[in-house]
Image: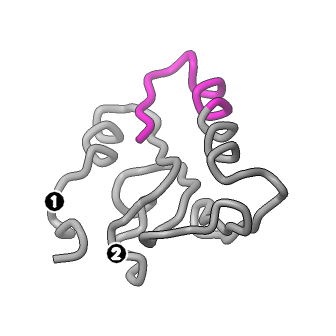
Amino acid sequence: MDRIALDEVTIGDAFKHAGYATGLIGKWHNGALDDRDHPNARGFDEVLGFDGGWMDYFDWWVNRNGRRETADGRYLTDAFTDEAVDYITRHRRTPFCSA
């Protein structure tokens, strides 16, 4: 009971099916140990975030579409904000959903 059932439709699944670009930026607290639960497998085209229940906001690491990226000197919330602004800018002329 610590993750969304694999047959459950996520908001990423629904919007992707409708032709939207889908992105997840931030915390995905839905089964950090099984690749079937990764947001890329649950309808999100682009992911930047962390899977578990906590992260150090100064000495952080995040998952970008299955690859690990480590802290670059920014506060984690600032890194997420920068990513969100970039995502919106890149998709401003097409339908998108970002969670």
Q: Secondary structure at mark 2?
A: loop
Which of the pair 15/52 is nearer the observer?
A: 52
The spot of residue 92 in percent (x, y) is 57, 19
Query: Which residue is farthest right?
Result: 73
Extreme bottom residue here? 33
Q: Please name the residue shown 55% across and 58% down the image.
A: 49
Q: Quadrant of residue 61?
A: bottom right
SS at circle 1: loop
Which residue has dot 1 on it? 8
Q: In the figure, is residue 9 to the left or right of 85?
A: left
Location of the C terminus by quadrant is top left
Of the two numbered discs 1 and 2 in the rendering, the one whose residue sits closer to the viewer: 2
Circle 2 residues within 10 Å: few <14, some 14–19, many ≥20: some
Q: Looking at the rendered structure, which numbered label has been put on residue 31?
A: 2
Taking the spot 65% from the left edge, 24% from the top edge, the residue there is: 89
x, y percentage for residue 54? Answer: 49, 69
Which residues, given as a range, are shown in magenta? 85-99
Name which residue lies at 54% across and 49% down: 46
Q: Earlier in the sequence, mark 1 or mark 2?
A: 1
Whole-number angstrom distance, CA of label 1 to CA of label 2: 14 Å
Instruction: Say whether marks 1 and 2 touch (CB < 8 Å).
Output: no
Q: Amino acid at mark 2?
A: Gly
Q: Nearer the viewer, residue 62 or 21?
A: 62
What's under tag 1, amino acid-wise? Answer: Glu
Task: Decide: is 99 above or below 76.
Answer: above
Lateral position of residue 34 relative to residue 89, left or right: left
Q: Nearer the viewer, residue 67 or 59?
A: 59
Q: Quadrant of residue 62?
A: bottom right
- 60 up-or-down from 31: above or below: above
